[in-house]
Amino acid sequence: MNRYNYRAKDSSGNVVTGMVEASSPQHAAKLLRQKGLFVIKVSGGKGFSLDFLTGLSKGVNPSELTNFTRQLATMINAGLPITDALLILRSQSQSKMQSTIAQILADVEEGQSLSAAMSKHPKIFSKSYIALVKSGEVSGVLDEVMTKLSDTLEKQQEFRGRVKGAMIYPIIIIIGMVAVALIMLIFVIPRMTSLYDQFGAELPITTKILVFISESMVNFWPILVVILAFALWGLKGYRATKAGRRKLDTWILSIPLIGELQKQVILTDLTRTISLMVGAGVSILESLHIATEISKNSVITEALEDIAVMVEKGFPLAMAFSKHQDVFPFILSQMVAVGEETGKMDEVMAKVSHVFEVESEQKIKALSAAIEPIILIILGIGVAFLVISVIMPIYNLTTKF
């Protein structure tokens, strides 16, 4: 978006000047004419701009998108035109979200629909988000759809916050353990090794292993860094392939506690999204296609693709889900069958989402309870290994005298 200086006449014939944001001089003139002004001159738009820095930012925070959705829903419910609502939100937002809203506002003022304007920013607005907005525009209930969408985003953000919060403690402990181990291997063990060499102490096997690891890290750390970088690069390349991604995703889901937790989190988001889309008037088939594209696990994605194909061929949705009981629990196909019979698929999927959310929270508590003793056991074994490796040579020295 560029800023253009303009000179125009109003309906009374008075000359007015000012500045307008637009994508081109023609767009600026069009905006001014829509305001009832007779354009005399439009200039500028080539000045120094910091807009290129926007691309260097990390993107829009999920909380920013949630706040934007909630505020837009509130303004639309209050009867404000979309352009006025976007104008207010643009002035209240910051960083990349502000420039995004400005571009959406410009596109809407040019006559594009809100969903079409948002679809130009796929990194911010997901396909399910755009599909819901489009459904609200077509059915004339955009205010209701935006309210439900903001409620769902807030629930998702709160749920993910609880999941991340439960993982903070074990992550901090693991980072601390790794830091202490590196300090011991890089700074402490080399000094102890020189002391052992001076006295000619006989080193036990545990000490030899520790000295070997320490010397490798001190003397060959550039090679180790290169090997680690190549390993990560190879892993990333392997995951980029279809077979590699499926294998890794299958392995992640098979990890005790962690895999089940990730599966429950994905199913919670999936069923909540489908519930929202079906309730907003999006067809089941289109909802499945969108859910397939936004799923982050290839195993679940492939299952959803097969379900979508079966539904397209005329099979009931419940039967399609029951074909993949290794991915989707039996309760999902049961509840989907109830939704098909009652015609209340959105309500049923919302209840299933709540069930998965409760189960996820229970698994988080179980994981937190299990990780604590596991970390203590690993920490105890590590400390015992270090103590034995350091103390045994000293003990051998003292027994010689």
Image (tube, rainbow, N blue to C red):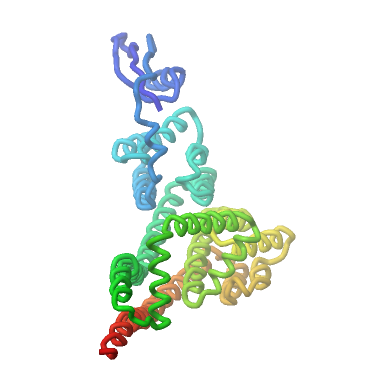
Q: Nearer the viewer, residue 224 or 7?
A: 224
User: Is 32 above or below relative to 285?
Assistant: above
The image quadrant that residue 42 belongs to is top left
Camera-nearest residue between 165 and 27: 165
Above or below: residue 321 compared with residue 47: below
The quadrant of the picture occupied by the C terminus is bottom left
Please determine whether, in this image, residue 286 is positioned above or below residue 47. Answer: below
- From the top left corner, tell me how far across and down residue 282 is, in percent: 57, 53
The residue shown at (37%, 76%) is: 368
> In this orientation, does residue 166 appear?
no
Give the residue at x 31% y 79%. 390
Quarter of the image containing the N terminus? Answer: top left
Residue shown at the point (37%, 35%) measured from the top left = 53
Left/right placement of residue 281 relative to residue 175 reads: right
Q: How many marks?
A: 0
Task: Give the percent coordinates (x, y) of residue 247.
Answer: 61, 65
Q: Nearer the viewer, residue 173 or 317?
A: 173
- Residue 306, quarter of picture: bottom right
Residue lying furthest right in this view? 313
Measured as percent of width and height from the top left, residue 219 is found at 40, 60
Locate residue 263, reporting x and y percent: 52, 69
Q: Is residue 163 left or right of residue 307?
A: left
Does the rendering let one see residue 179? yes
Residue 120 horizontal side relative to residue 378, left or right:
right
> Residue drawn 44% across and 25% down?
23
